Amino acid sequence: MKDWIAGLFLFVMMLAVPLHAAPHRFALALYHFNLQYVAGAGERNEDRVITESFEPLLDLFLAHPEWGADFELQGYMIEVIRDRHPGVLEKLVRLTVNGQIDLVSFHYSDQLFLAFPRKDIEVSIEMTKEVFEEAGLPLSGVVFTQEGQFGEGMLSVMRDQGYSIGILPKNLFHHLHPGEPAGPLFTHRGVDVLIGGEGFEAQTPSGPLQVVWTYMGDGELLATNGADPYLGPLFREWPKAVAEYEQELADLEAAGYEISTISHYVDAVRALGVLPAPLPPPLDGTWQPKDTNNVFRWMGGRGVFVWWEADNEIRTGNMLARHTLLAAETLLAHAAEAGIDPAPFARRLENAWRDQLFGEVSDATGWNPIRIEVEYGRSHSEAARMTAQGVIDDLLAALDLPAASIDTATGAVTLPQDPPSCLPRAEPPIPLQVTAPGRRTKVSWCRVSGDLTYDVVTIAFGAGVQRTVSVDFPFTVDTIAYTPALLDEIVSYPRSAFGFEETGLPLANGLIEITPGRFLVKDTRRVHVAAIVGQPGTDLRFRDETLSPRKSAVWRFALIEGRENALALAKRWNETPTLTFTRP
């Protein structure tokens, strides 16, 4: 009886879908714009991005009210359009009111957010939402990001912040899972995920589905025939390139394709009866992983202009600045409870966070940063740190405190106490390999005992001739057990679940398991380069190809037993540390 009913149901469903149903066709595009394309190049360069590459595409869609697309840009770009380009803002308002374009924005600055704790991106999103509201523009639920950064922590933040569709770049998807088909739609951590940039054909309960992508990449290049903002005055609109692209879209429309926004496509495929498939295991990454060894290019990998690069210096400086900001906010909350007016200090810290998000910009350390981009990251983060330090100094004076230890996790402000002792170890608990041609090195081990017990290894690199230094740790587990950026948990996937030979992971909180039950935690104020992870049988490597020959460096790591202990130490070192300050 049950078999007969099931057969009847299947027969009725077959009748509901014509044998030769017309395919549902969608043409998608995502134009990724970055006003910090040449970070530090000034307003004239920023304005060219808007007038020579961004506005021509707006005009294209205004000429075709039936077409839709997604424009991704940082909140700062909306701010500049609002303040300096009112005509462009008016066009954006018209296009969004018409429902033609979705404005995609996840961060105020085009920052390397996968390298930093969740607090930083939350501040960035808050600033972005404020800018959009002030400009009278709707913020899309779609998320694509600078350098195509993607991770499951990003999806978690999206869910909590009201975003609904994450774009996983096709190259990162296939770097992790070669040969896996793109499919109509995936889901992970309660968020829809679409593989960006890869067309496909599929069968749905309502008939065939065909999807093409007409564009997914740097939007600056489309209207300028491939020219980029590094070319200065030569970066300008190329009307023929826009006309050719317009004809491509017109031809697709004539062939039955709907020129659609991503959000409309997702709604449509759900209406066709498509249920999102579980996303294969993700890892933190970027959109061109084969060219950049994933995030390594921004966290230790050298570019063309290596004599200016300083990846570890910039990223550890970013961490020190954001920790100082956190301490200033914590002390301000304490001072407010003591009756001190917080308003003037809060305004200073708001400006400091703006500087900090600029300092975390991706282009300060990659792809091929020129000198002004490196200095842009360094100077903005240093400005943030100095502002926060000034607030701390003024609050200590207002509170009449000669010094204070500030626990940014609990909010406690106490008199300084001696840090726990680290007693030297006669023998190292594990072997490691230090490589630094032309430099003197010194490796020291000690042990901290207390509420958390762990071993600390310090690797000192002297000045030398070559720029590349590295440390290899034994990596005997068959899993990748780490904390994805923006999460506060450890996830674990078999190393064999991925198809790459090796990949660079940011380890925003510094944590990864290296032997069964034993975790490594990098101190991101000392070393914040990518962890290079390979297939079983390979060591775990931290490598910096950008250390100036004139400079020395000291890296610090901890070895600790147990997941919960490792998470607690990673949080204590790299997310919400206790910092001590003395009044000048």
Image: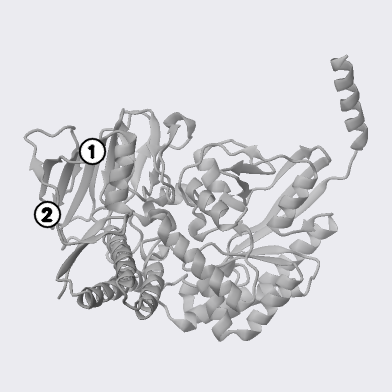
Q: Nearer the viewer, residue 335 or 28?
A: 335
The residue under label 1 is which amino acid type?
Leu
Q: Residue at x 17, y 43 (%)?
A: 457
The residue under label 2 is which amino acid type?
Asp
Residue 1 can be seen in this image: yes
Q: Nearer the viewer, residue 195 or 279?
A: 279
Left or right of 7 in this view: 513: left
Q: Position of residue 47 (x, y in %)?
A: 53, 81
Left or right of 466 in this view: 533: right
- Which residue is labeled 2 in the image? 418
Tally of numbered tags: 2
Q: Nearer the viewer, mark 2 or mark 1?
A: 2
Q: Secondary structure at mark 1?
A: strand
- Which residue is labeled 1 in the image? 559
Disc 2 and disc 1: Cα gap in Å? Answer: 22 Å
The reply to whether dot 2 and dot 1 touch (C-beta < 8 Å) is no
Q: Nearer the viewer, residue 17 or 552?
A: 17
